[in-house]
């Protein structure tokens, strides 16, 4: 079966967004997105920087790069992440295996990031954790690839 796809670039109303248009024949709902998001942390609380909604009968691979810098430029953190998720009919979003991260930092604390399955909201959460009493500015660029059970 031959398939094709197209690239849709962001416009001024959607900064930091690109969509790779999905397969036009079969596998309805299959797509690939690349997005950017940002957040500021001021403590060591887990904070969502981005979320991805997961409908029933979908599977995702989520991968990306995160970088943060303390507001005075004295410390930074960065690295990569990858995780696989799925959601069955009538079920909750589930992490398949474990999240792979490569975190590098020069902080006196332990800033970090990860992916999590949020079974209350049925989302994949990209999460960052800053450092107590420290303002950090975070940016993530992430891509997700989605496939559904539909082959129509």
Image (tube, rainbow, N blue to C red):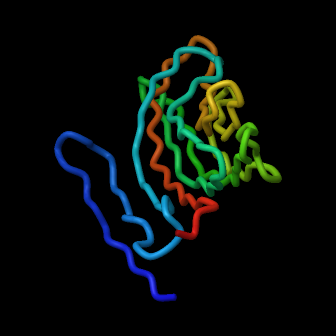
Residue under the point 67% across and 27% down? 108
Q: Nearer the viewer, residue 28 or 71?
A: 28
In the rendering, at what x and y percent does residue 11 appear?
19, 49
From what the image shows, is residue 96 above or below residue 94? below
The percent coordinates of residue 28 (x first, y second) are 49, 63
Q: Residue at x 37, y 64 (%)?
A: 21
Q: In the shown orientation, is residue 37 left or right of residue 106? A: left
Return the residue nearer the eye: 55 or 118.
55
Q: Is residue 96 left or right of residue 101?
A: right
Residue at the spot 63% in from the left edge and 14% down from the top edge:
132
**Foreground pick, 105 / 113:** 113
- Does 26 appear above or below 126? below
Residue 118 % position (x, y): 68, 31
Q: Where does the image place residue 1, in percent across and percent down from the top left?
A: 52, 88
Q: Quadrant of residue 37?
A: top left
Q: Is residue 29 above or below residue 72?
A: below
Q: Give the vertical position of 40 relative to 127 (above or below).
A: above
Q: Quadrant of residue 61?
A: bottom right
């Amino acid at each position: 079966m031959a398939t094709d796809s197209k690239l849709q670039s962001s416009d001024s109303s959607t900064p930091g967004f690109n969509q790779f248009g999905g397969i036009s024949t079969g596998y309805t709902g299959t797509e690939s997105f690349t997005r950017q998001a940002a957040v500021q942390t001021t403590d060591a609380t887990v904070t969502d920087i981005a979320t991805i909604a997961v409908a029933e009968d979908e599977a995702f691979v989520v991968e990306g790069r995160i970088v943060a810098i303390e507001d005075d430029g004295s410390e930074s953190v960065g690295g990569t992440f990858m995780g696989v998720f799925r959601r069955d009919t009538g079920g909750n979003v589930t992490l398949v295996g474990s999240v792979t991260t490569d975190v590098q930092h020069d902080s006196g604390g332990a800033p970090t990031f990860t992916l999590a399955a949020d079974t209350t909201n049925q989302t994949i959460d990209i999460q960052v954790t800053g450092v107590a009493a420290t303002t950090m500015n975070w940016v993530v660029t992430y891509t997700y690839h989605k496939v559904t059970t539909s082959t129509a």
